[in-house]
Amino acid sequence: MFKLSAAALSAAACLALCNSALAQDASISAERIREHTRYLSSDLMEGRGLGTKGEALATDYIATQFALAGAKPAGEDGTYFQKVPLVGIETQPNSLLTAAIKGKNEEFHFGGDFVGVDMMQRPDARFDDDMVFVGHGITAPEFHWDDFKGADVTGKIVVIFTNEPPSNDPKFFDGRALTYYGRWTYKYEEGLRRGARGVIIIHTTPTAGYSWDVVRSSWGRETPYVKVRPGDKALSFAGWMSREAGERLLGLAGKHVDELLAACEKPDFKPIDLGVRLRGTMVSKIRALDTRNVAAIVTGSDPKLANEVVIFSAHWDHLGIGTPVNGDSIYNGAIDNATGCAILLELARAWAALPQKPRRSALFLSVTAEEGGLKGSEYYAAHPLIPLARTAIDLNYDALFPWGRAKDVVLTGAERTTVLPAAQQVAKRLNLAISPEDTPEQGHYFRSDHFSFAHAGVPAFSIGAATEFAGKPEGYGKKMWEEYNAKHYHQPSDEFQEDWDFTAVQQAAQFGFLLGQDIANQEKLPDWRPGDQFHR
């Protein structure tokens, strides 16, 4: 049996009574989604921070709603929960980097000059290693590109830029759209594969796509990581350096940022031994984080296919209690991502209410630690409750906009999979257009939980927010998104509003409900489209 708090039981019982008259109705309800969103983003949840009372309340509530819906426990030991062993690492302000060459030294201070973390997860770590510049840090044989060109970087600190070499060729690194080779997470992974001791990314706004302030704020607080086990390999330093600090660092070797950027954008670029030695002292505050994913299942009707699953996912976590803004310190996360969790709960209810279940089973997965870098879904992909070989697809929901009736839907990554034709048919049935991403160069595909499944080989994409709304002027959705992104994203003001219209959120849920059934009834498992980087 799983244990629930009194507050969660009370709220769940109230909601169940309110919905009792609709218990036999399998249609998707905007009102139910609205009330789940209201509750999960209330001040009672304290921003749904990891390892807090808010986490216990939120995950208990989600488990209760799964149970009331008739979805069975899919977690560990007969519960709705999967424990996710994380550690929180907060790099301390007295962490210091010192670069030296031929008697000349430059000091770099945490927060202003650099940010980063000891991936070995030690409270006090030191390193002293040579530095080598390796361009964008990419090895991509399918694009005939290798920034390393046989260089041995074992035990060294590699210095790189993020993003990819530019080109007007739409087939070269997929043109305007960012591939995973351009993501900073890939840079650290490749450095580790190559045996590097550490990886430093020199930040520029054009290569990163966002300002140094974004990097500094994201890396300047406690961040969760999957716990390193004995024998695991990890970087002693993974981090970023500001452009100004990068100029000082490269200046020791007689180089400049713009000079090296230009050099590494040519195919004949070769790694450059900087001749600089970097000493690091990384002081970290480390604590165990007891957190959990929530999982429920509705069993399929086909004796042969019922052991395969369609996954619907959404992250339940947000930023908890933080720095007050206008006197408010609770980061409620109403849009991000109480809306996605609310959809997940409504999908579970509607799926369980179907008189004839689809052939495959449906797994409803609410994951932890998305805000800390997709750590809950990453852990699930490495420790799946249902083997990934029997996972048809992951359909993910993250931050939906309750601003009226949608005219379209954005499917982040559907074109990568063989599911796209079915998705187009569902869109037609719901009278929705499928709109492309406005900013594919920012790599949104790699920034939500579906990517953890894609990274592990499972077809996956997000069913996203609308960009156009009925009865609103053209560009209304983009204008509202820009306002949300500028004023409310990751701020205490991302709070539930009484005047929100959840019709578009309901439509996104309907889309996933119909598409999920189609996939669950197909003879063959979906796949990546030939030529996609995950197919490769």
Image (cartoon, rainbow, N blue to C red):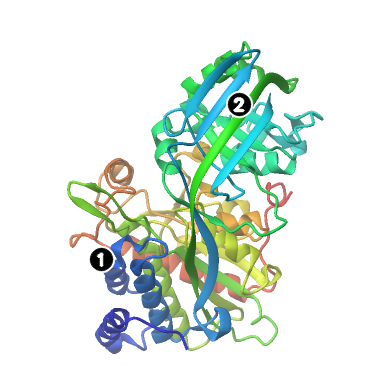
Position of residue 80 relative to residue 41, above or below, is below
How far is mark 1 from mark 2, CA to CA?
45 Å
Residues at discs 1 and 2 in contact (Cβ within 8 Å) = no
Residue 510 or 320: which is nearer the viewer? Answer: 320
The answer to whether residue 39 is above or below residue 334 is below
Residue type, numbered disc 2? Pro
Q: Determine whether the residue tagged by mark 1 lies in a helix, strand or loop.
A: loop
Apparent side of residue 372 relative to residue 460 in the rendered image (left or right): left
Q: Quadrant of residue 15?
A: bottom left
Query: Which three-letter amino acid code belongs to the residue tagged 1?
Result: Ser
Residue 198 in picture, x, y percent from top left: 64, 37
Residue at the top extreme, as displayed: 254
Q: Residue at x 65, y 35 (%)?
A: 173
Q: Residue at x 39, y 86 (%)?
A: 68
**Label number found at residue 166:** 2
**On screen, residue 291 above or below 79:** above
